[in-house]
Image (tube, rainbow, N blue to C red):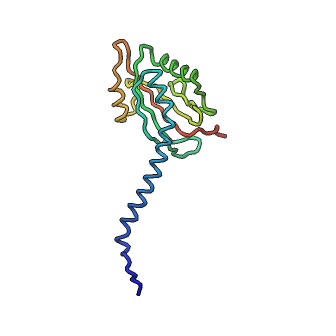
């Protein structure tokens, strides 16, 4: 005779939830690694070319083109400059363009506020250059990088906040 002993649904539910959460976490982690990789060129540029302290994290970005939240990454960085903010932002963007970054096809950015959308290969990034005196994002990471950067006596601290997502075509 075959034993047809079944576990009650109440005992199976926690096991099923654990399995589903584990599978979701594994796929999220794999996607998260890809998202973080999108920010590696930004972090490398800011740390090597501008001697900034930078941290990269996973992020989501509200995209005005698709009206969706898109997976991506962010770089929060702090540095020092003896120039004014306008000159510092112009220098940063000029150096990025010289390194091969380009404007996105439909930027809808705010150059007057030192905020631009730039493309590197298959990644679009939104850059914001600011000082803590004029604005702050208010994240723990921002606080950490700002405190970790020790400016020269003649330099003032400034920050760069970058959000990156997969490259897209211009909006119709």
Residue at left 53%, top 23%? 112
Position in image of residue 124 (x %, y %): 56, 35
The one nearer the camera, 86 or 38, is: 38
Position in image of residue 56 (x %, y %): 43, 35
Position in image of residue 87 (x %, y %): 49, 16
Number of dots carrying numbers? 0
Q: Quadrant of residue 4?
A: bottom left
Q: Quadrant of residue 148?
A: top left
Residue 48 in the figure: left or right of residue 94: left
Question: Which quarter of the rendering shows the N terminus?
Answer: bottom left
Residue at left 47%, top 52%? 27
Up/down of 24 relative to 97, above or below: below
The one nearer the camera, 34 or 13, is: 34
Up/down of 165 relative to 145, above or below: below
Farthest-out residue, front: 1
Up/down of 122 relative to 51, above or below: below
Question: Which quarter of the rendering shows the C terminus?
Answer: top right
């Amino acid at each position: 005779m075959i034993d047809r002993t079944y576990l009650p649904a109440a005992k199976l539910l926690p096991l099923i939830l654990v399995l589903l959460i584990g599978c979701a976490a594994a796929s999220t982690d794999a996607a998260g690694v890809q998202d973080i990789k999108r920010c590696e060129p930004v972090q490398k540029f800011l740390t090597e070319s501008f001697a900034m302290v930078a941290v990269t994290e996973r992020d989501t970005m509200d995209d005005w083109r698709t009206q969706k939240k898109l997976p991506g990454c962010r770089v929060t960085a702090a540095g020092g400059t003896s120039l004014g903010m306008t000159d510092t932002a112009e220098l940063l963007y000029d150096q990025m363009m010289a390194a091969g970054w380009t404007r996105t096809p439909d930027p809808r950015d705010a150059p007057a506020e030192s905020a631009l959308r730039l493309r590197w290969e298959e990644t679009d990034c939104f850059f914001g250059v600011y000082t803590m005196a004029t604005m702050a994002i208010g994240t723990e990471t921002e606080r950490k990088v700002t405190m970790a950067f020790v400016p020269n006596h003649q330099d003032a601290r400034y920050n760069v906040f970058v959000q990156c997502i997969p490259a897209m075509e211009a909006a119709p």
